[in-house]
Image (cartoon, rainbow, N blue to C red):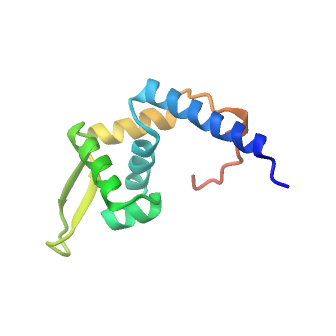
Amino acid sequence: MIDLCAIRKLQTSLRSFEDQLKQQTGLSFNDALLLCAVNKGICEPSALAKELELSPSRLTRILDSLENRKLIERTLSILDRRSLTVALTETGRAMVQTYSCSELNLPNELQFTQSPNT
């Protein structure tokens, strides 16, 4: 049988972590995940949507928000003028560094062994 109470505790812990992330960095969880994905080299909106499991409309709203905050920039692809690419700005790279190195307290329920590639 599935332990629904344990799942609820994970959900509550994740929400608490998201609140802390927002407080310390100003980033939502999806903002941070998108910046991380772009930092790892995923630069096409369709690939970002797939990686983050976001609808194209939700992805566009996140990209708009991050671009308005000068954390990313969208430019025409050099390979295909019909396509866009997403890149971190200097401010965006600094933000990735900030939240990657911040002293966020990850709840015990969310602590997993990280592989060296994460």
* Residue 14 or residue 113, whichever sits in front: 14
Q: Residue furthest bottom?
A: 80
Nearest the camera: 29 or 58? 58
Q: How many marks?
A: 0
Residue beneath the point at 18% across and 75% down? 80
Task: Tell me if residue 44 comes above or below residue 21 in the rendering.
Answer: below
Q: Position of residue 18 (x, y in %)?
A: 52, 34
Task: Locate the N terminus and report the quarter of the image it occupies.
Answer: bottom right
Task: Give the image location of residue 92, x and y in percent.
Answer: 31, 41
Quarter of the view holding residue 37: bottom left
Compared across the picture, whether 58 is left or right of 12 comes to: left
The residue lying at 21 percent from left, 55 percent from top is: 74
Q: Report the front residue among 89 and 21.
A: 21
Measuring from the top left, give residue 56's x and y in whole percent. 33, 61
Instruction: Please identify the residue farthest to the right as the structure is shown.
Output: 1
| Outermost residue, top side | 23
Q: Which residue is painted at 41% across and 40% down in the image?
A: 96
Corner quadrant of residue 109:
top right
Quadrant of the rendered image containing residue 17: top right
- The picture places residue 115, in percent across and down from the top left corner, at 65, 54
* Vertical comparison of 38 with 96: above or below: below
Camera-side residue: 8 or 87? 8
In the image, residue 72 above or below residue 43: above
Residue positioned 77% across, 40% down in the render = 5
